[in-house]
Amino acid sequence: MRTTKTVAGFGITLTLMAGIFSGCGSSDNSNSGGSSDDKTLIVGTQNDYPPFAYVDDKNVLTGYDVEVIKEIDKRLDGYKFDFSPTTWDSIFLSLESNKIQLIADEVAKSEEREAKYLFSDTSYFAAQTVIIVKKGRTDIQSLKDLEGKNVGAVAGDSYTVLLEDYNKKNGDKIKLKYSESTSPADILQDVQTGRLDAYVNDPVMTGAIIKKQSFDLDIVGEPITSDNIGIVFAKDKQGEELKAKIDPILKAMKEDGTLAKLSKQWTEGEYIPE
């Protein structure tokens, strides 16, 4: 949800780190050929959010966000990275409890989040917010058109916060239907069947799901917002140290064109913030 210019790798062991790691330490589940003395960093991300983070047909976690982290792993000495597939509703708690040490999951920067967590200085993706409806529907083109409609929502995500803020200012006129599932595909299925009138989310991710599932859905109207996506760290000494190490690498990846290349590969567009 930012300004945009245009609208796999090494093997991973998908182990759910249910408290195994109380902090950064050595691990046999290395994703790189580093030294056994390298410290392991656990990266929290979803596994059902294509094309950013998902399990492919070979049961390998991949996607744009995952590949960005893999490239950082190649360039960062002294560390190795493992991924912990984490649901959205628990990802920040996992960071706060040090079950994971960073988040790469299309997390949009906001004042509220930056008050609680550290974000990478360089934003690695520019994501828009759009409205998705059933194909052929013409009565919804804007946020105002969602008033009186049933709209899918996931507690705590930036898209839902946007809708909640709109409701605070406009008398709760949008009927938010909070999903027990954090999977966008499940919510889009409800739009497909008519249980929901609309869904608000990112056009790249929703477009990928619509194509894969052959849903009869349309992205309508103009983008509502644009947001900068960053890597998230805990707001503590460890988070500050990791941020200081990763920031220059992410900046170099932007300057040398690596982020643009990965964006084109995974999203078919160069969605890198200026």
Image: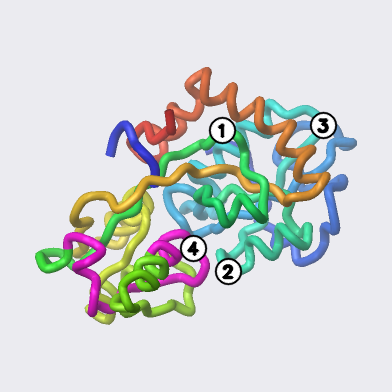
Q: How far apart are the alpha carbons under marks 1 and 4?
A: 21 Å
Inspect the image, locate mark 2, and give the three-letter code of the amino acid beneath it. Answer: Asp
Lateral position of residue 217 relative to residue 39, left or right? left
Task: Say if mark 3 contacts mark 2, CB within 8 Å.
Answer: no
Cα distance in 3D space between marks 3 and 4: 33 Å
Going from the N terminus, do you reach mark 1 or mark 4 first?
A: 1
The magenta stretch spans residue 143: yes
Q: Do the residues labelled 3 and 4 touch (CB within 8 Å)?
A: no
Q: Find the distance from the CA under tag 3 to the CA under tag 1.
A: 22 Å
Cα–Cα gap, marks 2 and 1: 25 Å
Can the viewer see residue 186? no
- Which quadrant of the figure contains the C terminus? top left
Residue where numbered disc 1 is placed: 122
Q: Decide whether residue 37 is among the magenta residues.
A: no
x, y (%) of residue 88? 56, 64
Residue drawn where x is 42% and y is 48% of the image: 51
| Magenta-highlighted residues | 141-162
Quarter of the image where one finds residue 37 = top right
